[in-house]
Image: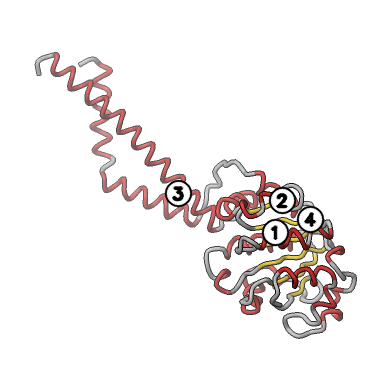
Amino acid sequence: MTSQQKAVSSFEEKFRKVLTVQRLALIIIAVTVFLLFRPLFLPMKIGFQTQDFYNHIEALQPGQVVVYSSDTGPSDFLGGRRDIYKAVINHLIEKNVKIIFHPTGAAWSGATELYKQLTDLRTLTYGTDYVFLPYVSGEEMAWASFAADMKGFYKTDVYGATLSSLPIMADINSLADVNLCVVQYGIFTWGEMFVRQWPTKYGVTMICMALFSTLQAWYGTYVKGNLDLDLGFAEYEKLRLIPAEHILRMEARNVVSLMIIGLVILGTIFYWASGVRREARTTMGV
């Protein structure tokens, strides 16, 4: 064998002794567990929808009004989407805006206390900085009536206090007094309903947290930003540098996949080197 072949053979033997199958498995497990608790925030391309969503929140000025519309119930805040809802709400709070929480799901009332416990709402003054509205059935008709006359449609907040008596509602009458709508929904037909009743009628900027295909037809005209479920959630968490669930899962999956690809390449090199060595030995009559 040549000196180069001997060097490759020596390195291969040492590598095989150091990196056994058991040690390799432990390394992969250790890396995965580490990334599940502390992401590396590796470089990633941020989609235009996520960047638009983030930019519109960043552009908010102190004192402006945001309607946060969601069908979130207790199970959502205790499940897989807790981190992203928490991240978006805390981002709004950082901008020192007034937040009107508008529910579209019947389980809403059971989640109001979780909103306060799991987000920075607990640092704000209820009735002055934010308000929880009660759930009213009716979907599109209810949302249209709310947009036209908030204090006329909702007589009280979720706790039974007269809505018109709360300081936050003093200068807010309709959706024309709102600067931004953040809309989260899971039922596909709702996207078109919101577009018809809110941005189309009142010119208010609307950003969403929903499957992109349900709002693609209006993107750029009536819908100005979107978090396209898990990928969008991970991208938003990356922009915010928050070690939350979706970026943790994505990075763990990506790093382990890269390790596996790297090992396949390394194994291919060793296999090739072994073939060269076997050929050399055959040529020499060994």
Q: Is residue 202 above or below residue 14?
A: below
Mark 1, other Cα within 10 Å: few <14 / some 14–19 / many ≥20:
some
Q: Nearer the viewer, mark 3 or mark 2?
A: 2
Of the numbered discs in the image, which one, if any, rests on residue 253? 3
Q: What is the secondary structure assignment of the residue under circle 1?
A: helix
Of the numbered discs in the image, which one, if any, rests on residue 205? 4
| Amino acid identity at mark 4 | Thr
Structural distance between the alpha carbons of marks 2 and 4: 12 Å
Q: Residue at x 13, y 17 (%)?
A: 282
Structural distance between the alpha carbons of marks 4 and 1: 15 Å
Classify residue 194 as left or right of residue 235: right
Residue 85: where, in percent of width, then height? 63, 63
Q: Mark 1 or 3 closer to N-term?
A: 1
Residue that mark 2 sits on: 218
Q: Residue at x 9, y 19 (%)?
A: 286
Q: Are marks 4 and 1 in contact (CB under 8 Å)?
A: no
Image quadrant of residue 191?
bottom right
Residue that mark 1 sits on: 192
Q: Is residue 238 above or below residue 270?
A: below
Q: Nearer the viewer, mark 1 or mark 3?
A: 1
Classify residue 151 as left or right of residue 45: right
| Amino acid identity at mark 2 | Trp
Q: Mark 4 or 3 closer to N-term?
A: 4
Classify residue 211 as left or right of residue 126: left
Q: What is the secondary structure assignment of the residue under circle 2?
A: helix
Structural distance between the alpha carbons of marks 3 and 2: 33 Å
Residue 123: where, in percent of width, then height? 72, 71
| Amino acid identity at mark 3 | Arg
Q: What is the secondary structure assignment of the residue under circle 4?
A: strand
Of the numbered discs in the image, which one, if any, rests on residue 111? none
Q: Mark 1 or 2 closer to N-term?
A: 1
